Amino acid sequence: MAIEQWKRAFFNGTMPACALRGGWLSFCLVDELGDGKAYGGLAYEMADCAGQRYKGHLDGQGFARLEDICRGPVVLVFDALYDAEEGYYPTLLKRERYPIPITNLQVRAEKTRFKHLGGERNEQNPACRLGDQYYQVEVRDLVRHVAHLPPLTPSAHGVQRHALKMMADLGFGPPEPVLSGVVLFPNRHTILEVRPLRALRPMLSIDDRFCALNLYQLALMSTLSYCDFGQQPPKKPLDQVSFPLEPSVGNLFAEKLSGYHEAWKVDGEQVQRFYPLYEEVPYSLRFEILPFDPEIYPQNRAELGAVQEHPAYLHFFDDDKFGTDTQAFISHHDEVVLIAIRGTASAADGLRDANAHQVDFADGVGKAHEGFYQAYRAMRDFVLRYLDQFYRSQRIVICGHSLGGAIALLLAEGLRRAPDRNYTPLLYTYGAPRAADAKFTDGASALVHHRIVNHNDPVPSVPAPWMNTTAKLWIPGAVTLFSAPTPGGLLFAAGLVRVGGNPYQHHGEQQHFMPITLEDGTQASVLWKPGCESIQEAACNRALQLHGDMPDRDNLLKQLFQADQHFMTASYIPAAWATLRRWQHTLESQGPLVTPREYALLDHALETMRQQLRDKNRELEQRRAPNQRGQAHEHNQALNAEIDRLNTSRERLHSLRWRRLEVRDVYGSHSHSASLQPSLKRWFSHRENRERSPVASVPSPVHGDRGRVHSLDIDSIV
């Protein structure tokens, strides 16, 4: 297409700069509603094709006009750094490691809002009719340093990026190390609609108190920990990185949520949609993935080799040094540091690392499972290095599934006891095995730990309190011990007694998913705190099905074939979602947490279990020699103690009939947040979240939706 007559003098090899003056141009920055007040007073800088620079400030309506300039193209930038002391920005600007070059333009764009709830491009801005040229721009179009900013969102009205390169190729303007800015042409009024710089972040409560919000959100984050970080290139990047793999940790935080796009996939084979509850925040308050910019940060330079820092190095732990197969990710914003730890993903590695031997917990008191302890020590320095750089009194929230939950417990206690740090971790674990002995548990009593168990998940049953041996000694004898136990062996397998030393013991307050099948076949789940070993060790599902015999706690190997109750996408996440919906509905209706029919089913199950224990107690008594009957015996004492705990469990169940929820029970520290209702509106906009059943039925797994996260943690079993 022919160049317009007035432009020809400026785009030829003999006249790279124009001596003619007398031109003018004007421009206006506006938000998505066409209002320029959000950008009023901003300082700008322009360079014309002759190399002359112009500086000025927008007026109160975001407008500026230049007269008597060279009649050629100019480049506009808004590169002045933020210079106030407001909010979280000074922390980011002045931190020792990875200071962020936040401009005044970025701060203004973070204070604007999208016209549409989902952040879709606005195609009907009223201001577009007021100019000769209309562009939809983003902050990264107008500033020099962009590594910390989100990827561009496609637009039909995007800036002409080739114009900037064309000016550089023709030698127009002063030399610039980086091509940046928007090209404007003279004798035109240009409208620049700046996309709001907002992000989404998963809502997390920072209260000690258990809440349904964290139950669901951290189940999703624990599952995400099984994904790769997804950085390209994964090692030794030269000038930039990207995160194209979906799902992956980097893709979720650095691209999806940073670009204001909701994401629901946390497992590569996931079919059902489970959306986190997202809150909209200024971009700088998102869960941060640190920038990669070798020009600004010398530690990013590839010549550093193995110690080169880049996002995967800083946020992702994948142990290839100590051979523990441990994987975790860490990120933060102004209120939370989030650490999610993966369970074992390789059955072969699990068998190799299986080790129930106890070793001293060097960072506290008591003894820990040696395999879990080795994994904790492998990642400890990685976490401490991150906290040294980015911890600013946020709440440290740690979560993990299965083996990841056991490591998370040791990590949380290690951080709590770290000298001169004042860390106060908040811990949620899912299907975690016992990780340490009774002395450790007593010493860690101040650690806030909400331990989630899905009804017949076998993994929390192990290591049994009596175990203190290496895998190669235990595994060969397991078939004999568990397939045909003696009466004494039955009690050992049930985990009710021990032999010598301090027993393995669970830490934290257990929250148990109790399954319910109603008359119409609907599957539901009640979350409660049972407080008894029979349920704590995942045997209650047998009683609920009312087989009429002792729950198969004597045969741990059989439980392994029911290990689908251990899986995240098939079991824990659906049950957590159902609990959140149940509690939301209960809060709205001000009704009880369980219906009369649910109470009757659960109470009958508990009474059946109690009767089974009594029958077993009488049976053992009859087997004893006549002269020993009636005497106190360790086996009988253990069974009587369990019967007492079942009585306590029935009392707790009874209290659910009258319990009324508060907002804080459901949403924790977000209960009175201004962002709660908009976040709920966004969450309920997805049809998957509009289930209104009074019992919030558990979604049935879609065929094939078992997920990549479902390999059994053999190292957790032993």
Image: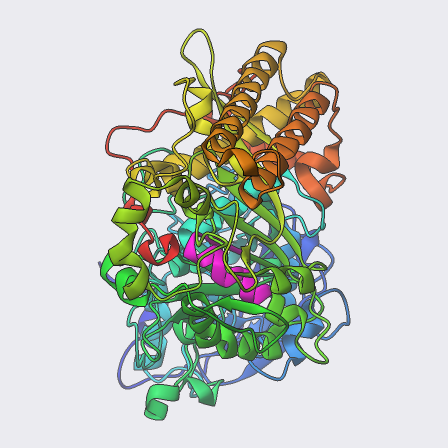
Percent of width and height locating residue 651: 70, 25
Q: Nearer the viewer, residue 377 or 555?
A: 555
* Residue 44 visible in the displayed image: no
Residue 477 pos. (x, y %):
28, 55
Q: Residue at x 77, y 71 (%)?
A: 85
- Left or right, 122 with respect to 477, comes to right
Residue 78 falls left or right of residue 94: left
Quarter of the rendering occupied by the N terminus: bottom left
Q: Is residue 686 above or below residue 311?
A: above
Q: Is 113 located above or below residue 371 in the figure?
A: above
Residue 111, image x and y in percent?
Answer: 66, 54
- As drawn, which residue projects farthest toward the top? 519
Q: Nearer the viewer, residue 190 or 116?
A: 116
Q: Nearer the viewer, residue 277 or 113?
A: 277
Front-most of residues 621 and 656: 621
State how many labels appear: 0
The answer to whether residue 622 is visible is yes
Residue numbers of the magenta segment: 399-412
* Main secondary-structure element of the magenta-colored stretch: helix
In the rendered image of this protein, does residue 608 appear above or below residue 94? above
x and y percentages locating residue 527 in the rendered image? 58, 31
Q: Is residue 495 magenta?
A: no
For the view shown, which residue lies furthest in the bottom direction?
303
Colouring chosen for the image of the structure: rainbow
Residue at x 27% of width, y 61% of height: 351
- Which of the image's four quarters has the C terminus? bottom left
Residue 316 is drawn in which quadrant?
Answer: bottom left
